[in-house]
Structures are given as structure tokens and as C-alpha cells.
Amino acid sequence: MEHKCLVFKLTCQLFNSFDNRHHNGTRHYGYCVLGAGPSGLQMGYFLSKARRDYIILERNSGPGSFFNKYPRHRKLISINKIHTGRGNREFNLRHDWNSLLSDKPELLFKRVSSEFYPPADAFPLYLSMFVKELGLKVQYGVDIGRIRAVQSATGRSYILTDQHTSDYTCSVLLVATGLWVPQKVEFVGSDLVEGYESISTNPEDYKHQAVLILGKGNSAFETAQSILGSASRVHMLSSSPVRLAWQTHYVGDLRAVNNELLDTYQLKSLDGLVEARLEKIVIAQRMEQSGRRSGGRKKEKKRQLYLTLKKYVHSREEKNSSDVTGEELPGHHIDNFPTRKPYDRVIRCLGFRFNFSIFDSSACPPNSENAKGRLPGVTAWYEGKDTPGLFVLGTAAHSRDYRSSAGGFVHGFRYTARAVHRVLEHRYHSNEWPSTRLLTTQLQSWILKRVGEASGPYQMFEALGDVVLLRGSHCEYLEEFPIQALPQFSSLSGHEVSSHGLIVVVMQYGKKKIDYLGRSRAETDWTKAWQSNFLHPVLYYYDTLPTEEEMKLRPPGWPLPRPKAVHHMVEDFLTEWDGPISHIQPLRRFLEHCVQTDLRAFYAESCFRSSLTHRKPPLYCQQGYLKQQGVPHNSRLRQHVHDAGLAPAERNAATSGADPAFPNYLAPAGASVSSGLKLDL
């Protein structure tokens, strides 16, 4: 009888839960994640770990469906470096551009591929493994066609309607749909152009053909590279010159693995690059005879595509012309016009854009101000502008660091997704941003550990940074905060900044234009660390939080506003900032300037002598030796030390102030308050 009652009770509970979730045919969740690509699954992991009420909605039958088709030539350009010579998992993530973050050390991309540039088919396989082993809640076959926002007495919520007119309602919408709508430019003759999304990937189909490719990004060069050995000539056209990733430090620019056409262009082997605005070109077709067959019969007419310019084409009603006159071709006006010869096909490879069409006016984020409006505009904490409660994840959120960091790629947005989750945890669940409490004497060692192994700031350079809240004798260390959101730091993290100020640790590149393969490309002198060109740690010290206005008016190219003091750790060929003279000592002197106390480590004998001769021994001795970590366990001796005032109690963080004699102490100690850096750059 008791067993039947228990079953009935559990059944009622399940029914009530189901009824709340599916009231009036609408499914209710705390969080809806739209898209089961890498960013959606990454957020799903964090929500699952925090035991939140969430669902991931995916329109296709499996995760990562984008990679079932793209890149078209089936090779990823994301590095899969397995053998680093290091066993540190966090360090290894710096060179693993495909794995997602989880608490399972073995759940890495290397389980599905060991190739340095892996096959694209491996990525959906890895994502499926990620979903299965973590038990993520993904609902497949749900094609959301409309998203609208509604305001009620309980707050704002979002309603998502699928292809079966079923509704999903959530308080927080996390859009992780990526970029999959082909980017197009309308011009006269644009309907004669083939798209990257539909072209043949068989090189044999391009034999003896002249091909014009519109675009000079990785998809364009990937396409060119696949047909170099088959096509008679390949020309590439866009409005701007090629940007090389190894020069710009931006992973979205042309990667070396795709740039073989640069060789054939510069070595004059029929291929080439030209610049022109697509809005000013015209693609026109003419039917031409190309010779005679054996026996003297004429060949059938063959379609030829000509590139010309608007200014040469006579005004006509039709958008596309089936023919053009000789006077309308550029060769008639300039006899050495570079693209005067006809092409057999023209291919558009202009990338992708965000799908805005599923949002109605109440829920649609604005177009970004950069990236030609292809991306949604989001705040510094990745919330849609004018759409509270709607956050954008992954590649679609790249407008925050477009062309400057790695936020548009897996090895970047896995960290921004974690940052968004921490914002959500504080806003909706009152959980502060995770922090580590350190004694001030431990700060230098912790910073050295982070710059030596942390993967988040290393990949999201100039976008995510570690924030150190100074509290006198101790500090709080927060990892991977979106540095452009510093003015809103307290409201986003739940932590307050004290009168002692804060330090922001950021990884960044130099801003000078240099010969990136020249002899003077690197800086090795620590006294000129501010001239470092390659990735290196930079510490910014502020006595108060930067304001929104200061953030807007920061110097060009700077990731943060002008601080009270700044310290560059000189770039290192091995990216190991552990040199005692070049890295550690300058860092210690800078930190001493910020916290206004001696941060040197002392032997027990030196602490003992200092305790006998100084009223206030160095902080290292106060927090170590004199806290019974160096004094013999003799109660009478400890009492004597205490009564003599030789072991002062730890100062309260709220009341401790700078020692006015400290600057005078620094000078004879040989410490530098500016670390030898120029602060007026």
C-alpha cells in the first residue's frame, strides 16, 4: 500500500512539473539556447553544471551541422596541436583551437583527430561526443522561425515559435546560431555569379577554365587553392588588398595554409589579385565561338563572362545583359586593363552574415556598427543592445572584438561564453564572479602563473583580462573579465573596488607597423618592454574604476583607458615570462609601486633581524614568519614577540593605507616606480 502511495505521489509530482513546463502547449524554461553549434553547447555545459533550467534548440538532426557542409573543401584551419611537450592542461589549451571547456580532462578534440589541420567531418563527431558524455539537454528538429519579446508583470520574456507553431518561452535567450547566411553584394550581373555555398568542389570541373573569384578571405583562397592545378587561370577581386594573419595577428585573415595562390601570383604563373569595389563592377555575358572542330565545322557557341565597370556600360533597363558591345568592355578604353579577358565562371566567396530574419521588431538586436553590419550589435558583456535578457554567443558576437581578437572562433568564444555565464549567474542567481583570495605577498607568484599558462587571456588578447582588486594586506583575483565592461564591473561581477584600486592584466600585441620577418621584429631588452611587438602581458593600475566616458576616449589602439601606471612585461620568444631579471624583478617593482609595500621574499634569519630592528617588518615576514610559520612553537616566545610589538596584527583591508615612508624606502632598494616605461604613448 505504501509503495502504491509513493508511486502515486511521484506521478503527481511529475505531472505537475510537466504541466508547468507545457502549460497551454507552451514549453517554459529559464534559459533557451538557440543553436547546438560549439558556442551553444559550450553554454549548455555551463548551465548544466550550474543545474539551471535550460534547453538547447537545434533545427537540424545533430550538433554542429554547419560543419557538415563548411568549409566546402573539408579542411579546418583551426590548429590542433597535440604535442606541446607540456602536461599542463590549461597551457595546452593555448594551442588546441577546437576543444570546448569542461571538467572532463579527456574530453578533447584530439580524441577524434590527430591532424594539425583536421578534417571538417571530425568536428560534428566531437560535438556529438561532447553532448553525449556531458548529458546536455538538446532538442533536435526544432526550426525556430519567429522570436518575439513580451513584457509582463513578472518581467521580460522571449517566445520562440517553431515550424509546427509550437512555442518555447524563456526569461533569458542565448542566441548561438552562428553565421550561415551567405553574404552577397548586389551589382549588375550578380545573378550570373555562383555562390561558395553551391559550387562544385571537384577540381576536374574546372579544367582549362578561367575563373574569377570575388573575395580575398579564407573561403576565397580555399576555393582558389583547390582549383589551382586544374584552372587555366584564377583571378581574385575584392575592394581591399589581402590581409595576412601572420602580419595582422588576426586569425580570421588569410592563413598560410590557404595562400598558395600568392606564390603563383608573385611568380607570374597566370594567377593574380586585383582590387575594385564590387558595387562598381558589372558581370556581363557574351556567346562566342572559340574555334573549329576537326573537319572544318564550327564549334557551338560558348558563354563567356566579362568583367567591366559601371561607368563603361550604357544605361539599360535590364539588370543583367546577355551581351555587351565592344565599347562597353574596359579593354576598349584601357588596352592593358588587368581583367580584360573573359572568364568561364565567376564565384562569390564573401563570407557569411547573421540571420536577422527570425526576430520581430520587439526582439531584434541592431546591426553592428562594424563588419559591414553583418553581425548583431551587443554590449561589452554580449547582451543585445536594446534587447535585455537576450545574449549573443559565439561567432555572432564577434562584433566586440572584430578583426582584433579571436572571439569569432572556437578557441576564443569558449571563453566569452564562460564570461557570459558568470554575468548570468550574478544577475539572476546572486552568485559573485568567482575569485581567488590571495595575500598581497602571493600576488606576484599568481600573476606569473597566469601569464605563463592561462589560455583565456592568451587567446582573447585585448578582450578578456584578469582583474586584481587590491585590499591592502590581501587582494581578490578575478579571471577573464571582459575588459571593455570595466565601467560596469561592480554590477556585473558583484565585487566592489576599494580605495586601494585595481590592476588589470591583459595580453596584447605591439601597435607599431614593422617588418614582421625583419631583424628588428622582436624586443629583448626589458627596459624597453613597452616597445614589444609580439604578444606579451601588460598590467594597468587604476586607483578608481574607469568610467564609460574614459573607455570611449581611450587612446587609439589601446584596449583600456590611460591608467595611473602601466607595466609591459617584455615579449619572450618562448612565451614563458619567468626570467628573474627580465620578467620577475621588473614585475615585482611595479607591483610594489601599486600596493606601496615591499614584496620581496626573505629568509627566516632576515625576518628575525628585521623584527628586532624595525617596528614594521616587511609584509612577507608579517604574513609568513611572524604568523608562527618561522617562529619555534613555544608559547612563551610567541607571547614575548607579541608583547614587544614585533609581530603586529594583520591590518584590516578597509583601513590599511599606504606607508608614507614607502617611496623613500624604494629608492635605496633600487626599485623603480615606472618600470622604465614610457607612459605617454
Image (spheres, rainbow, N blue to C red):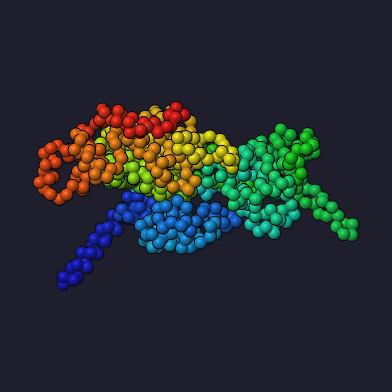
| Res. 193 visible in picture | no
Closest to the observer, 629 or 535: 629
> Could you say where residue 103 lies in the image, as x and y percent from the top left?
35, 57
Residue at x-position 69% and y-position 57%: 205
Residue at x-position 60% and y-position 56%: 73
Snapshot quadrant of residue 587? top left
Q: Quadrant of the N terminus?
A: bottom left
Asked if 681 appears above or below 121 in the picture, the reply is above
Residue at x-position 38% and y-position 54%: 44
Snapshot quadrant of residue 318? top right
> Could you say where residue 420 lies in the image, as x and y percent from the top left?
37, 45
Closest to the observer, 346 or 23: 346
Closest to the observer, 81 or 218: 81
Residue at x-position 25% and y-position 58%: 16
Is residue 653 left or right of 509 when viewed as pictured? Answer: left
> Could you say where residue 22 lies in the image, as x and y percent from the top left?
32, 55
> Could you say where residue 356 lies in the image, as x and y percent from the top left?
48, 43
